[in-house]
Amino acid sequence: MRGCERARAGLPSPPCLAACIESGCPRSVEETDHATHYVVTRRNLPLGVIAANLVHAAGESSPGNLPEGTFAVVLAVPDEPALRAVAVRLELAGVAFVRVVEPDAPHNGALMALGLVPGRKEVLRRYVSSLPLLR
């Protein structure tokens, strides 16, 4: 069950989606011609770990029912301190996003990825345009 569906059902939702849920994020995403869903990961992780955390970040940050034609963009930063800096920048700008933190060993609470709540590319791009695509 996704964040917005969880909120409608009265279940706990990730706190970082609260602003999106309160503003009616599914409605606002559907009204855009082409929503964009950005996910940011760390490059210093093994490929399998990157893949798992990207899927986790994308799933947790999506309100579901995205319109046809939604773009998915995967960006990368070198390491955890750089990812934390992106998270701070997004928080200060009021951008709704989800943090993926790995509680188990060997990462023990490390920040692994960020999933931005999908929205208009023109709006979100200003906060992530300096980040390179994952390659």
Image (spheres, rainbow, N blue to C red):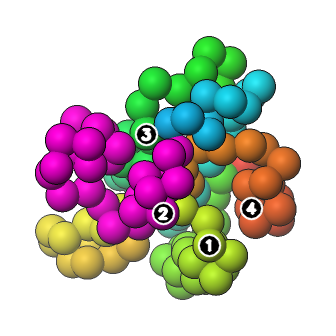
In the rendered structure, are the residues bearing label 1 and label 2 in contact, judged by CB atoms less than 8 Å apart? yes
Residue 77: which quarter of the image? bottom right
Measured in 3D between alpha carbons, the distance from the residue under mark 3 to the one under mark 2, in whole angstroms, is: 12 Å
Q: Earlier in the sequence, mark 1 or mark 2?
A: 2
Q: Amino acid at mark 3?
A: Pro
Q: Position of residue 40 (x, y in %)?
A: 57, 57
Q: Earlier in the sequence, mark 1 or mark 4?
A: 1
Residue in view at x 33 percent, y 67 percent: 15
* Residue highlighted by disc 1: 94
Measured in 3D between alpha carbons, the distance from the residue under mark 3 to the one under mark 1, in whole angstroms, is: 17 Å
Write the start and end of the magenta stretch as one range.
1-25
Residue in view at x 15 percent, y 51 percent: 11
Indicate whether residue 18 is drawn in magenta: yes
Residue 134 visible to an observer of this rendering: no
Q: Which mark is residue 128?
A: 4
Q: Amino acid at mark 4?
A: Val
